[in-house]
Image (spheres, grey):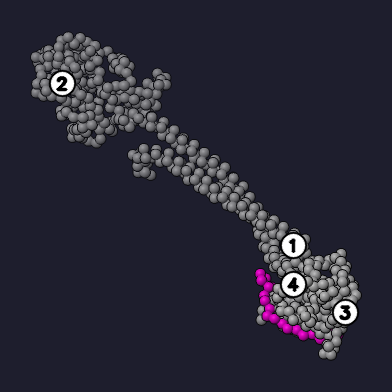
Amino acid sequence: MEELGVALRRAVTELGSTVGKGALLLAHSQLAQTFLEIPQGSDAVIRQLVAREVERQKPFSGPAVWQDEPSAPYGNGTGRLLHLLPRAVHDDLAAAFRSAGLQLTSVIPVSEAVPELNSGSGAAGGYPVLVGVLIPGGIVLSLRQRDGALLVRSIPLPICDPERIGAELRRTASFARQQFQISVARICLAGPAIAVEEVRRVGASSGLVFEVWAETALDYWATWAQTYGDQPRINLLSREYSEAPQRRVRSLWSQRFGLTCLGLATVLSLVLEFHRTKEVADQSHLRMELTRLEKSVVEARTVNDRMRIQALLVHAWDATVRLPVYLWLPGYLAERLADPLVVTNLYLVTQSSGWRLRLAGCVSSAGQAIPDNTVSSFLTELSDGPLQFEVGVADSPPLIGRSNLVMTGSWTQRLEPLTQESRPRPTRFQLEGTLP
Amino acid sequence: MKRFQGFLRRKGPVRERLLVLVPLVIAAVLVLGSSLRWVRTVNMTSRLTRNVGQMERDLEVREQFHARARQTAIEERHAELRERLVEGLEGCREWLTRVTCTAAHHGFRVGIKFGTGSRLPGQELPVDLVPLNLEFLPQNSSEGESCHSAHLIGLLYDLESDRAPLQVVELTLKGSGRGLVSASIVARLWVFAPPL
């Protein structure tokens, strides 16, 4: 494999290729093809069965890369052609390409080229045909029906040994007869002209008839590979390896995405942290302000409570206290009181606002009647002051003589109207009023 | 180390997923942590701002109350009233002595009846309003004589100018026509009754 890597590096260097991709048409001693008889079933079932057969029939130890294809129908049977390659060989091939800076895109068994040879030359001779293609280091045999291959074998042997080649051809024809119950109609041989001629000569001596079918030019394989296309029908390149570039790209972009997210998150975190730091600074100012305000409020609350209690006491005093009118009222009344009236009783009591006053008096000479208009002139005297009298009453003494004989409340009293002279004049007066 | 590298090669997809997931998880943790811290800080700031606002309003209301109280000179008036309050039983005795002396000075005998005091409602200060009945009789009234009302007015002036807060509720004067016979005053005395 190292030689392959060296050759590839040299080719890349000499060609100056910048493609970076490479396909491999593989003829290898450990590349095996085998025929499987598989019952009918769904694709998934068939794949499971083939995978099981791969593990059972692989001619080497270790894991394998493989691909199968449906074989051409024969009789009533169906089968599949299985191509197998050791995983280690596959990895070595991929490593050799990678060492040359190439991405291996496909590993195609050389047997894939045989149908092209077949279609390139005339197939008028009829089927089934056993095609043998001499390649460097061996021969590829393909037993083909009209609509596809029944059998493919890659046999590593020196192409300069025509007897062994002839023997392999005979053995393959016998196997086809036994396995598929078909007789090979003709045997076609392709390859370098000298080798083909040698094999034909030896075969003729042993009773085999060969058609020399095509002479493969030295650049046939390269030409075939170029025209084969990008999507080979059989590609033994493992899925992991073939998808590796996409996976690498996907992984790269995923990592970039992750790192971008990480970067954005870091930036966002820094921005948030910056704002948070500002908020914390604001908080410290607010806390200082709050502490100051709390202190002020506590002080104010203490003063408030004290003032509220003080106000309650003061308001209670204000609500009950009245102007001390009793200090000046006796003197004031004495000044206004006209002779011969005297005040004998003065009653002063607080009310909802101000004072209520009741005073009573008589004439200075005891028992004398109050002269006419004396009380009214006293009231007139007081009217220009703060006193407001509502009621002025002059009391009469009890009736003497006949009046005493009459029962109080008798209606007959009204039968004799009293004259002015007979009506008793009052001896006492009583006044009621208010003071603010 | 080689075994670990081999493990990584075998577990390639896991490593790739880890390479994506780890930054994403770290980013999520960063953003979530920062956001939570920031949100918590902002909430704290808004709470502090609200508290400061409330404190300012509270202080403003209290200052307005102060201003009103100062306008009405509550403190001075309270101090004056508090100073005038008769203090306890001993204060009442002193006041009684003072009144008796003043009344005698103006030519009156005084008879005093104390009622049951009632606590001034809504006060933290223990202030009792003690109802009392003052009966002033001229010192020579036993002979049925009277005196001039000017004596009583002088007495009332002196009682008014006394520092004790005496609140007159009723005043009854009785005269004979030639002079004052008796004066009766129903009043309430404001007494500071400290707890025993």
Is residue B159 shown left or right of residue A6? right
Q: Which residue bears the numbered disc 2?
A: A73
Q: Which residue bears the numbered disc 3?
A: A364
Quadrant of the rendered structure where residue B25 is? top left
Which of disc 4 and disc 3 is earlier in sequence? 3
Instruction: Look at label 3 and name its amino acid.
Output: Ser
Number of the front mark, 2 or 3? 3
Q: Which residue bears the numbered disc 4?
A: A415
Q: CA distance from mark 2 to mark 3?
A: 164 Å
Query: Are the residues under badges 3 and 1 in a single subunit?
Result: no
Residue A357 in the image: state x and y as whole percent. Answer: 78, 71
Give the chain of mark 2. A
Q: Quadrant of the N terminus of chain A?
A: top left
Residues packed near mark 4 inside 10 Å, few (<14), some (14 to 19) or many (20 plus): few
Q: CA distance from mark 4 to mark 2?
A: 162 Å
Number of the front mark, 3 or 1? 3
Look at the numbered disc 1 and give the secondary structure of its residue: helix
Is residue A389 shown left or right of residue A41? right
Instruction: Look at label 1 and name its amino acid.
Output: Ala
Q: CA distance from mark 1 to mark 4?
A: 72 Å
Look at the numbered disc 2 and give the secondary structure of its residue: loop
Look at the numbered disc 3 and give the secondary structure of its residue: loop
Is A315 placed above or below A135 here?
Answer: below
Q: Which residue bears the numbered disc 1?
A: B69
Q: Residue at x 10, y 19 (%)?
A: A182
Instruction: Look at label 4 and name its amino acid.
Output: Leu
Q: Residue at x 87, y 71 (%)?
A: A372
